[in-house]
């Protein structure tokens, strides 16, 4: 198979459609009605020639595009020289006090310099917004929303304005889905009756997640005030092509492109808020989405804030080493330490293990390598379950899989085509052996568990045993799907909370936001953890990158709901807009007021890190739980 294709996409293309439909991941991006794949590509030059092959091309920014490809043309498409790499979409998951409490915000907004976010564009990519609420209006009742793009609505087939003067619903320029509304159309809906308003602007936020996030970041209505109450709003309601509440990679990339282009067109600095993530990937910055965000963050005057997710405490990740069993990435008290002082900095001796020999001392006298058994509890009623194993390509392991009833099979080494199928009890396991890619050094071994002759995967304890053959680092990293889509009883025994931040909070040039509980002034245990140590041995993390960047209050944050009132919300989804609003305050001070016209991008991140304050229970900074500390806006202003 062509190495331009992501490994998960290769497995999907090798798997029959009726099997893909039973999985959580392998059919994402495939349109059964039109028999097309929606794919993300990194390219060079020009892709206009693909349209002659009936392949739709949607250009994004920074050398990325979304292709809609008839299934029979996928293999031909990847032979095009201009295409460098191809990924399939992934699903993302939405991961209370007043938002301005406990982050040193009032000291910068209620007294000199009296910041409000005025002149800064706040882009919220989420589940939509209740545009009728007073929090999103000016004092005269008109809207503060400059543009609203609802990716879920069907555009009209006409172009231009109709004869009666009403607006034709169309997507934004350069895009083929959804409907864009400007402030004039929103004001028209606001001045109409309820039924007529829905006819003019039928966009709704059914779940309320986006309304809450926008309110925390920039809401303003008398008694309630978000962090940047005078920032202009740009809203993208992300598409829901599968009928569930979770957006896909492609919708997010479209939304990012749209926000950056609009900000440049309007000549405004922009903060983009992303309050969601997923668990698929090496968590090292190597996916196309992570790299796309790094590129987007360098266009215009842009800051991107991303939540670290809520996966730390739900048993979805385990990591360790065959060389030093029990030393887990970044866990205080088990031999790990701050960046630059960890036990994995010294060069490793290569250890080789003949068949049948499982424990051999290192040639340099360090700890012996030994097998590791990873136990996975699978609850009843799991219709499918995927497991990712990420490792260093230089390490070679024999891998054994044991079912709850005691049946065991040894996996072969890498095989031709990458795919291997085995059966244990009434469960079929699709296994894909990956290789390093042009943009990623890590190796993935992917397992997809599907029931055979019954509705659910065999429940009980599954065991994956790793036996060393040739070991240099000995590290391994297992991930399950997001806790939102699996039973609460499904997870790893002895799970590892470290490196549980979700993608794309792993992108280098975004501001990654964790959560703390302001009642106790302490880290919130659900908040996705990152890395700030020398244990990580794959990807950009090995170069010393620390994540998250900082933490903000994320427990019981009061926000507007879709019922006309206010509700306390918990999660990193609601810590992120506090940081996004704070970034808008800094950009107002610097760019809009002329104190520092270059206060955007990595400079905003640097100022927020520098101003962060200490939290209880944290012995050193940066660390994998709260990064450089708790958000403190007044200390982050260079005045």
Image: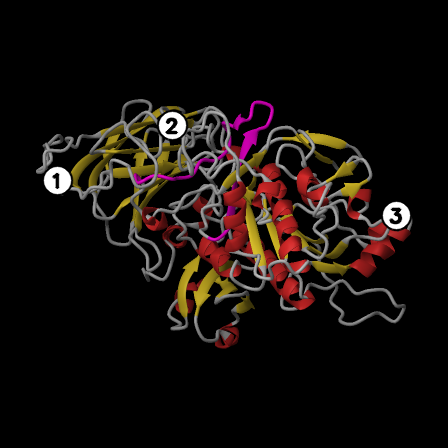
Density class for disc 3 (Cα within 10 Å; few <14, some 14-19, many ≥20) is few
Q: Secondary structure at mark 1?
A: strand
Which residue position holds label 2?
495
Residue 195: mark in rendering? 3
User: Which numbered disc, 3 or 2, marks the residue closer to the eye?
Assistant: 2
Depth check: 118 or 53 in front? 118
Q: What residue is shown at x 68% (from left), y 56% (from top)?
A: 120
Residue 249 % position (x, y): 52, 52
Which residue position holds label 1?
351
**Range of the magenta residues?**
509-535
Q: Secondary structure at mark 2?
A: loop
Instruction: Look at the magenta stretch and give its main secondary structure.
Output: loop
Q: Is residue 241 visible to the viewer in this orientation of the structure?
A: no
Residue 261: mark in rendering? none
Residue 502 % position (x, y): 47, 41
Q: Is residue 518 magenta?
A: yes
Position of the N terminus, as image quadrant, is bottom left
Residue 602 % position (x, y): 50, 54
Decide: marks 3, 2 in contact (CB < 8 A)?
no
For residue 101, above or below residue 577: above
Q: Is residue 542 left or right of residue 614?
A: left
User: Which numbered disc, 3 or 1, marks the residue closer to the eye?
Assistant: 1
């Amino acid at each position: 198979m062509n190495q331009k294709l992501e490994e998960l996409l290769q497995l999907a293309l090798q798997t029959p459609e009726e099997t893909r439909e039973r999985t959580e991941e392998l059919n994402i991006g495939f349109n059964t009605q039109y028999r097309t794949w929606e794919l993300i590509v990194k390219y060079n030059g020009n892709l206009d020639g693909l349209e002659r092959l009936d392949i739709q091309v949607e250009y994004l920014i920074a050398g990325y595009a979304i292709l809609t490809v008839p299934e029979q043309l996928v293999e031909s498409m990847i032979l095009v020289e201009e295409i460098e790499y191809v990924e399939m979409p992934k699903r993302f998951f939405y991961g209370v006090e007043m938002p301005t409490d406990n982050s040193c915000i009032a000291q910068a907004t209620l007294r000199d310099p009296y910041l409000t976010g005025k002149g800064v564009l706040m882009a919220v990519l989420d589940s939509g917004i209740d545009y009728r609420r007073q929090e999103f209006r000016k004092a005269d009742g008109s809207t503060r929303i400059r543009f609203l793009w609802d990716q879920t609505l069907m555009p009209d087939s006409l172009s231009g304005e109709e004869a009666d003067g009403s607006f034709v619903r169309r997507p934004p320029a350069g895009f083929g889905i959804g409907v864009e509304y400007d402030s004039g159309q929103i004001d028209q809906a606001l001045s109409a009756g309820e039924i007529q308003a829905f006819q003019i602007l039928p966009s709704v936020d059914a779940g309320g997640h986006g309304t809450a996030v926008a309110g925390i970041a920039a809401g303003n209505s008398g008694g309630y005030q978000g962090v940047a109450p005078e920032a202009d709003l740009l809203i993208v309601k992300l598409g829901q092509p599968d009928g569930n509440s979770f957006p896909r990679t492609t919708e997010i990339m479209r939304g990012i492109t749209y926000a950056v282009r609009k900000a440049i067109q309007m000549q405004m600095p922009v903060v983009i808020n992303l309050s969601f993530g997923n668990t698929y990937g090496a968590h090292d910055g190597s996916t196309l989405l992570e790299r796309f965000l790094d590129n987007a963050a360098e266009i215009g005057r842009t800051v991107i804030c991303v939540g670290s997710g809520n996966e730390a405490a739900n048993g979805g990740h385990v990591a360790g080493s065959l060389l030093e069993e029990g030393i887990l990435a970044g866990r205080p008290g088990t031999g790990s330490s701050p960046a630059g002082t960890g036990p994995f900095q010294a060069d490793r001796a290569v250890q080789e293990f003949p068949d049948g020999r499982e424990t051999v001392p290192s040639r340099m006298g360090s700890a012996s390598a030994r097998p590791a058994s990873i136990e996975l509890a699978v609850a009843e009623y799991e219709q499918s379950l995927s497991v990712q194993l990420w490792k260093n390509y230089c390490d070679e392991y024999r891998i054994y899989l044991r079912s709850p009833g005691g049946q065991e099979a040894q996996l072969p080494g890498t095989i031709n085509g990458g795919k291997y199928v085995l059966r244990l009890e009434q469960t079929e396991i699709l296994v894909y052996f990956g290789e390093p890619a042009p943009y990623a050094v890590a190796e993935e071994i992917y397992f997809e568990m599907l029931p055979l002759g019954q509705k659910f995967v065999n429940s009980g304890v599954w065991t994956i045993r790793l036996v060393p053959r040739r070991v240099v680092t000995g590290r391994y990293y297992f991930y399950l799907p997001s806790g939102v889509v699996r039973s609460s009883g499904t997870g790893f025994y002895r799970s590892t909370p470290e490196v549980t931040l979700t993608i794309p909070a792993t992108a280098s040039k975004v501001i990654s936001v964790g959560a703390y509980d302001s009642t106790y002034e302490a880290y919130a245990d659900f908040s996705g953890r990152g890395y700030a140590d020398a244990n990580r041995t794959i990807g950009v993390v090995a170069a010393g990158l620390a994540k998250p960047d900082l933490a903000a209050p994320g427990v019981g944050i009061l926000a507007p709901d879709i019922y006309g009132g206010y509700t306390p919300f918990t999660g990193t989804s609601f810590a992120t807009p506090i940081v996004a609003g704070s970034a808008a305050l800094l950009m107002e001070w610097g760019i809009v007021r002329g104190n520092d016209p270059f206060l955007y991008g990595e400079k905003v991140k640097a100022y927020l890190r520098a101003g962060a304050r200490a939290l209880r229970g944290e012995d050193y900074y940066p660390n994998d739980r709260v990064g450089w500390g708790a958000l403190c806006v007044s200390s982050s202003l260079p005045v």
